[in-house]
Image (cartoon, helix red, strand yellow):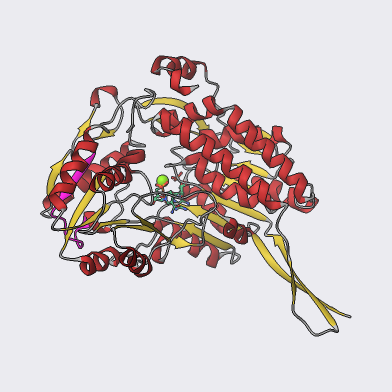
Amino acid sequence: MSAIRSAQDWKKDAEKLSIRHQAFIAGKYVPAKSGKTFDRINPATGQSLAKIAECDAADVDVAVKAARAAFDKGAWRNEAPAKRKKVMLKFAELINQHRDELALLETLDMGKPINDSYNIDIPGSAACIAWYAEAIDKMYDEVAPTPNNALALITREPMGVVGAVIPWNFPLMMAAWKLGPALATGNSVIVKPAEQSPLTALRVAELAAEAGLPEGVLNIVPGYGPTAGKAIGLHPDIDCVAFTGSGEVGKLFLQYSGQSNMKRVWLECGGKTPNIVLSDCADIDKAATAAAFGIFFNQGEVCNAGSRLIVDAKIKDRLLEKIFKVGETLQPGDPLDPSTKMGAIVDKTQLERVMGYIKKGTSEGADLVFGGKQVRENTGGYYVQPTVFDKVKNDMTIAREEIFGPVLSTITAKDDEDAIRIGNETTYGLAAAVWTRDISKAHKAAKALRAGVVWVNCFDEGNIATPFGGFKQSGIGRDKSLHSLDKYVELKTTWIAL
Ligand code: NAP
Ligand code: MG
C-alpha cells in the first residue's frame, strides 16, 4: 500500500489519527495518578502531537499489582502453549492489519522515514511476535541422566513479572524483541517506552487485548526514566528487567537490582561498531554502500551503527569517494515523504548532542570531509546531514563515545593486524564487520573480534533466528533467537525418588 501513497496521503491520515495518550493498566486506558502529562513533540516539525500520561512510581506500583494478579491467577501462564501461540499469532496479525496506522504513529513520534516504519519496523515487530508464538509449542523440557532409582526433571517456569524498558530508536521493534519471548513463556509484562516514543506501544496494548491476551498480562506505563523507569528498577515485586538503551542507564539497572530484590537484569546497550575494510576487499562498491547505510540508516540512531570505519591505507581514498556518492543520495527529508531515506533526529537534545560531537571531532583534529551541518531548520524540525570524518585517531572522543547520529569516523589502519587491533580497542562489543576476499582471514578476524555479531562481507544482516547482543559493556544477555527465551524463565529441578 505505501508504495502508492504520497506524503499528502500520509499527512491527511495524520490529521485523522486518534492517539492513545493514557497508560494501559489492567486492560484499560487510565490517566497517571498524579494527573500529570508530558508533551510529545514531532521531531519533523517541532510541533506537539499529544499530551501523554506521565506515569511515576505510584502508577508503576498499580501496574505491578495488576501484572502480579494476572500471573497468580494463571489465566495466561497456565494456558497450554498452543493456546498462547494462538493468541500471539492473532496479536501479530492485528499489528499487520494496522500497519498504516502504526507506521504513521512511529514516524510522527520519532522522525524515521515512513518507508522504513512501514517496511521494517511494523512488519518486523509483527514477525517477531509470530516467531515466538510459533516456537513456544515446540519447546521440550529435559530429563536428566540419573541412577535407576530416581527421575530428575528439568523444567522451565516463567519468571513472573517482567519490566521492559525501551529506547526510542526502534520503539515497537525493541518492545517486540522483549514481548515475544516474555509473553510466549507465560510472564506478565510492564513496558516503559522511552519518553520520546510511547505512541505505538500504547496502541498495540489494545490490539493484544483484542487478540485475547488476558487483563493485566500486558501493561504500558509511559513516563520519564528517572521516575517511572527507576521505579521499575527498584520495585520489589518485579522479577526481571529487560532493558535496551545506553550503557549509563543499563548500569543504573544493575544498581537498582542490588538495592532491591536481586531481580534479573538483561541489558542491550550501546556500541561503537568497527566496520573493517581490508585491502583485499572483493567489492569496494558493495562495501561503500554498506558502510554508508551502516551509519546513515535510521539517522545513525542505531545501536550497532558502523560508526568506526577502519580501512587499510591502500584503499581508503577510493572507498571514501564512493561513500560520499551514496551519502549524497541520503540527504535528510520530510519523514512522511515515501522517497525520504533519512528523517529527523529524535529530539532537540539529541540534535544538540550530535552537533556537539561534530564540533568536538573538528576541535580534536579530525578532518570533516563530508556534511556536518544542521539542515531544514525552517521546518522547525531537527535534521543533520550525513557526516564523515577522516583522519580520526581511535582515542578521539568521536571514536570512543556513542554519538547515535549520522556521523562516521574514518580510521586508517597500517595492515590487517592493525585493523583488528583497533577494532577491538573499545569498551563496547555489540557488533563488528570485516571485508576481505580471503576465507581464512575472514574466519580469523571473526574469531578475533570481541563482539556479539560479526558480519563478513556484509553489514547489519541477520534475522529473528540469530541472537543479538553484546560482549563487554554492550550488554548482558541476547535478544532474538530461541536463546532469548532463557532470559524470561527460571530452571527448576524436580528430583523424584523411585
Ligand atoms: P536511554 O537514555 O538509556 O534510555 C533507555 C530507556 O531507559 C528509556 O526508556 C529511558 O526513559 C529509560 N531511562 C532513562 N534514564 C533512566 C533512569 N535514570 N532510570 C531508569 N530508566 C531510565 O537510551 P535512549 O536514549 O532511549 O536510546 C539510545 C541508547 O540505546 C543508545 O545507547 C543505544 O546504543 C541503545 N540501544 C541499544 C540497542 C541494543 O539492542 N543493544 C538497541 C537500541 C538502542 P526516558 O528516555 O523516557 O527518560
Ligand atoms: Mg532517554
Write the residue at 68% across / 41% down. 88
Q: Nearer the viewer, residue 230 or 131?
A: 131
Measured along the vertical axis of the image, is residue 48 above or below residue 15?
Answer: below
- Is 158 situated above or below 70? below
Q: Viewer-proximal residue, 39 or 206? A: 206
Q: Is residue 359 visible?
A: no
- Asked if residue 406 is positioned above or below residue 455 in the image, the reply reads above
Residue 476 x %, y %: 48, 63
Picture coordinates of residue 383, whole percent (x, y):
28, 32
Q: Is residue 389 magenta?
A: yes
Above or below, comparing residue 208 to residue 458 in the picture? above
Position of the C terminus, as image quadrant, is bottom right
Is residue 102 in sight in this rendering?
yes
Whether residue 73 sits left or right of residue 184 in the image: it is right
Which corner quadrant of the image does residue 108 belong to?
A: top left
Task: Report x, y in % for residue 327.
Answer: 23, 37
Asked where in the image residue 29 lies, by quadrant, the reply is: top right
How many numbered discs? Answer: 0
- Position of residue 157 in the picture relative to residue 319 (left or right): right
Give the residue at x 55% y 28%. Answer: 99
Furthest-right residue in this view: 498
Name the residue: 20% across, 37% down. 325
Percent x, y of residue 324: 19, 39
On screen, residue 387 versus residue 27, left or right, reads left
**Which residues lie in the magenta part?**
386-397
Res 420 → quadrant: bottom left
Q: Within the magenta stretch, is there residue 472?
A: no
